[in-house]
Amino acid sequence: MVEKPSPDKAPSLLASCGRYIFTYEIFNHLNISKLGKNNELWTTDAIQELAKKSKVYIHEIKGKVLTTGDPLNMIKTTLHFALKDPELSKSIKEFLSSIRE
C-alpha cells in the first residue's frame, strides 16, 4: 500500500477506499508511525508495519468509484444514485433538461 502516490509512482491501479476492519494490534502501530505528508497520521503506514508481523487481508471490490469530497463530485454521486430510483429518475431528468444558461 502506498499513501496518496502520484499517478506515475502508483504501483497498481487498485485503491484503498478507507473501509477497514482492524484487530487491536493496529493501535500499536498507529502510536509509533511517523507523521506523513502535511503531518497526517496515515493508516496506510500502520497497515504496512502490521503486515510485517501479522497477516493483512484485502478484498478487491469491482464497481464504480464515487466520492463526495468536493462539490462537483458530491453532485455527481447524488445524481448517480438518484437516477437509479424509478420515482426520482424522470423528475430529475426533466429538471436537468430544463436548466438553461
Image: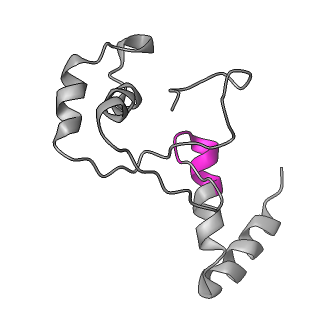
Segment colored magenta: 68-76
Quick check: 46 left or right of 13? Answer: left
Residue 29 pos. (x, y %): 24, 26
Camera-nearest residue between 34 and 52: 52
Which residue is pictured at 78% across the width and 60% down the height? 99
Residue 66 pos. (x, y %): 60, 53
Number of marks in the image? 0
Colour scheme: one colour
Figure check: 8 above or below 86 = above
Q: Quadrant of residue 83?
A: bottom right
Camera-nearest residue between 64 and 34: 34
Camera-nearest residue between 73 and 63: 63
Which residue is pictured at 52% across the width and 41% down the height? 69
Q: Main secondary structure of the magenta part?
A: helix
Which residue is pictured at 35% across the width and 30% down the height? 52
Residue 67 pos. (x, y %): 56, 48
Q: Quadrant of residue 62?
A: bottom right
Camera-nearest residue between 94 and 74: 74
Which residue is pictured at 56% across the width and 50% down the height? 74
